[in-house]
Amino acid sequence: MKNNSEKEGPQWSSRNDIRITKFGKILRLTRVDEIPQLLCVIKGQMSLIGPRPERPELEKDLIKKIPYYECRNSVRPGISGWAQVNYPYGASIEDSKVKQSYDLYYLKNVSFILDFMIFIKTIKLVLNGKGAKAQSF
């Protein structure tokens, strides 16, 4: 991101986000920006599969506005999850509400088979480049 890109507080990502540098766009599209999260998996702070964590600044607001939002924190956060493989990149509270429904489904049905399905769908998404950009305008 560009320096001082959030002077007025945290913002949702958007298509053609002016806060992102050209190099940052390349990192995002190639998913290289996810590598630090793999280190969190190795440290045991995250898992490969689970509800994807939101930025703490935005999560405070989401907890207030979306019923049961904090339930997703009952399991270790993941790099990929049911919401990520079934819904485009979230860029609003409304998107977060939809993703919350996927996260609650995951929490209710967590299993090795579901995790394996998410893993396979994640590989497909990464290889075809989908889901790396916000859908809102």
Image: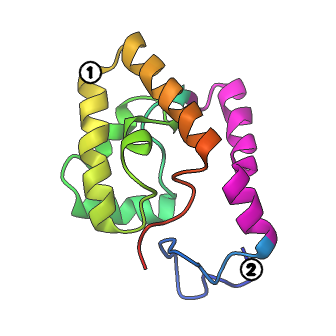
- Residue 13, how many percent across, how many down? 51, 71
Please name the predominant secondary structure of the magenta segment in the image. helix
In the image as oriented, which residue stretches furthest toward the right?
Answer: 23
Q: Position of residue 131 (x, y in %)?
A: 51, 53
The colour mode here is rainbow
Give the secondary structure at mark 1. helix
Q: Quadrant of the N terminus?
A: bottom right
Earlier sequence position, callout 1 versus callout 2: 2
**Is 53 left, or right, of 129 in this rendering?**
left
**Of the pair 49 and 31, the residue shown nearer to us:** 31
- Quadrant of the rendering where the C terminus is positioned: bottom left
Q: Name the residue: 52% across, 25% down.
A: 119
Task: Indicate whether residue 86 is drawn in magenta.
Answer: no
Residue 28 seen anywhere in this rendered image of the structure? yes
Residue wearing tag 2: 2
- Residues in magenta, as a range: 23-47
What residue is disc 1 on?
A: 109
Residue 26 sits inside the magenta stretch: yes
How crowded pointer 2 is (Cα within 10 Å; few <14, some 14-19, many 20+) is rated as few
Three-letter amino acid code at the position of disc 2: Lys
